[in-house]
Amino acid sequence: MSMDQPHPVTMATVARAAGVHQTTVSLALRNHRSIPAATTERIRKIANELGYRPNPMVSALIAQRRSGRSNTQGAPLAFLTNYKTRDGWRHSTNYVTLFEEMQAYAATRGYHLEDFWLAEPDMTPDRIRDILLHRGIRGIIVCPMPSAPYTLTFDFSEFAVLSLGLTLQSPVLDRVSIDYYAVMGLCVQKLLERGHRRIGFSTTLDIDNRVNHLSLGAFLAERHLRPRRFVAPFTPEKWESGALQKWIKTARPDALITSISPHFQQLKNWLQEMPVKHRPTLELACVDCSPDIRDQHGIIQDIRTEARAAVDWISSRVERAQFGVPGSPQTIMVAGSWRD
């Protein structure tokens, strides 16, 4: 004989326990001014004790009806950014591609993304939070942080929330990220297969921090296992031509891995500008090749899979009303593929 499943706690359940009408509960949970503060506090306490959680999809529909907006785009999700300017995040080709891929896939799941800027003039995190709740938005995807300190002040207690990448260090959220350790491992493997005996890696301290040291860690692990096949990595604070060329001349790598597409392109240009007699014989590879630049050699990150994983993750949590900062955060890591 099967065991009876517990009945879900609804707004009507809370109303019966509080001895009030269901409409009063609805207004109290929305902090409506028509309900006395003492009554609102009592009803909220009862709702919390009973484990009441609003249905986020119903909340979104109600919010859209109140505002007169059409639901043809599906239920909204927030894409939260914290750059110095509203469109600062759009300077990253990867972030733009990721947003577009998430938007396209979200549409197939009955959602759409709207970007919200935390640094909006005269805006506070609490005000953005109230705006999201008023509009029935219960899912937030956090864009990677622009720079240190990699922290965010926001009350996520009533939202399903996910961060992209590895930059956000506090609070620690569920996240979807490129697997920078595996990406570096694949790049090294391909260069070893091509017969290189002095493989080098260069990145800046800021980029190394942004990927939580995973690329550098993978490179150092390979160097530990095969010390004669690798040279010590070069990790300056800033990416400068003179210092890098001096290091190349001293370390004499026969292959050099760069961490981002712009560094690959700059290094390629620097080498081409050198006199032929002084130019080192050097194969370049990048662990973040631009898909649009065909002559970049190395790893193409799978941004499309990253985008789909993010939408699947956040939508499932919205639909199950799994809100707040997780006690045991989880991470989905997405690999890449090699391109000659």
Image (cartoon, rainbow, N blue to C red):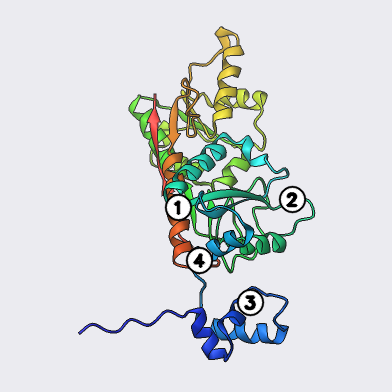
* Few, some or many residues within 10 Å of mark 2 (<14, 14–19, 20+): some
Distance between the Cα atoms at labels 2 and 3?
29 Å
Q: Earlier in the sequence, mark 2 or mark 3?
A: 3
Kind of residue indicated by mark 2: Glu
- Residue occupied by mark 4: 58
**298 w.r.t. 100: above or below:** above
In the rendered image, which quarter contains the C terminus? top left
Secondary structure of the residue carrying tag 1 is loop
Determine the secondary structure under disc 4. helix
Q: Which is more toward the observer, 273 or 132?
A: 132
* Residue for badge 2: 120
How far separated are the C-alphas under marks 3 and 4? 15 Å
Q: Amino acid at mark 3?
A: Leu
The answer to whether the residue labelled 3 contacts the one labelled 4, judged by CB atoms less than 8 Å apart, is no
In whole angstroms, how far apart are the C-alphas of marks 4 and 2?
28 Å
In x, y percent, where is residue 314?
Answer: 48, 57
| Count of numbered circles on the image | 4
CB contact under 8 Å: marks 4 and 2: no
Q: Residue at x 37, y 82 (%)?
A: 6
Q: Are marks 1 and 3 in contact (CB under 8 Å)?
A: no
User: Residue 138's image quarter?
Assistant: bottom right
Query: N-terminal of the two: label 3 or label 4?
Result: 3
Mark 4 or 2, which is nearer the eye? Answer: 4
Secondary structure under the numbered disc 3 in the rendered image: helix
Residue 110's label in the rendered image is 1
Closest to the camera, between mark 2 and mark 3, is 3
* Mark 4 Cα shell of 10 Å, populated few (<14), some (14-19), many (≥20): few
